[in-house]
Image (spheres, helix red, strand yellow):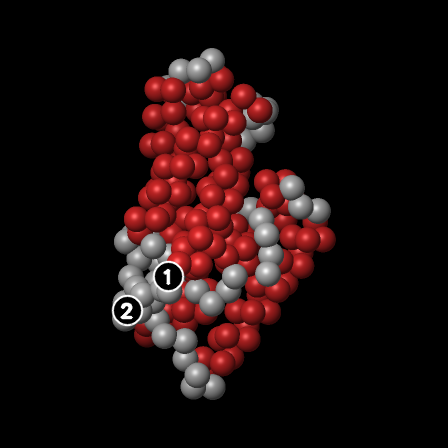
Amino acid sequence: MGEREAIDRLKEGEVDALEPLVRRYHARAGRAAYLIVRDHALAEDVVQDSFVRAYERIGGFDVERPFGPWFMRIVVNEAIKAARERERTASYEVGDAGAPLDWLADSASDPHELAEEAEERRRVWAALAKLPPAQRAAVVQRYYLGMSEAEMGEGAGRPPGTIKSRLYAARRGLSRLLRSQARGHATPPVGPSPYPSKEERP
């Protein structure tokens, strides 16, 4: 079953038509959710909830537009809510493994460069943990999901200026945190990613 057919059937209330969309988008949604919530089980919950939300809202989906960005905006919004709730009740656990930031890597690098890149990704991952969830989500949307500022704003119901400000604040925060690490005030690393690859409101 193709994506368009699956969507048409979902609009007719056939919940089984969600299966091909789950197969296509589950892994990418899980990685995006994990980058925001930073917890394996919680990321899985976010993805499951997002597919339920997609089914509930499919009646309002414009079939002339791509499904992927629309669905990933649901994932990001659900992840922001979950991250905020988690941060109200618990602190991040500390570990000593690397981060799932393979999307920053250059596969053509030599071993020495790859080692340096791995260390840089760990530093970025640790710094990312210190950002507010909405800023963290903006980084994930822009640089992991490759969404344009217009696409980001559409899903959040925010004007372009708000999205630009959020991205600017996120980049500035990451830069400040990375400079702090470089001066020797390193942020403790966080736990390993279960995935293999690569005071704002939503």
112 lies left or right of 53: left
- Relative placement, left or right, of 155 versus 93 is right
Q: Is residue 59 above or below residue 147?
A: above
The reply to whether the C-beta atoms of the residues labelled 2 and 1 are less than 8 Å apart is no
In this rendering, does residue 140 appear at all? Answer: no
Residue hosting label 2: 95
Quadrant location of the N terminus in the rendered image: top left
| Label 1 neighbour load within 10 Å: few <14, some 14-19, many 20+ | few
Q: What x and y, as percent, mark residue 113? A: 36, 72
Q: Residues within 10 Å of mark 2 (few under 14, many from 20)?
A: few
N-term-proximal mark, 2 vs 1 = 1
* Circle nearer the viewer, 2 or 1: 1
Residue at position x 52%, y 61% in the image: 132
Quadrant of the rendered image containing residue 22: top left
Identify whether 195 is placed above or below 181: above
Residue drawn at point x = 35 percent, y = 19 percent: 16
- Name the residue rendered at 28%, 53% in the picture: 194
From the image, tell me which residue sits under label 1: 90
Residue 186: image quadrant is: bottom left
View extreme (top): residue: 12
Residue at the outermost front position = 89
Q: How many numbered badges does the structure rendering display?
A: 2
Cα distance in 3D space between marks 2 and 1: 15 Å
Amino acid tagged 2: Gly
> Where 115 falls versus 6 (above or below)?
below
Could you say whether the residue bearing mark 1 is in a helix, strand or loop?
Answer: loop
Seen at 35% across and 71% down, the residue is 189
Work out whether residue 55 can be spotted: yes
Which residue is more in the foreground, 27 or 111? Answer: 27
Q: Residue 201, how many percent across, how many down?
A: 59, 52
Q: Position of residue 123 (x, y in %)?
A: 41, 71
Q: Report the amino acid beneath label 1.
A: Ala
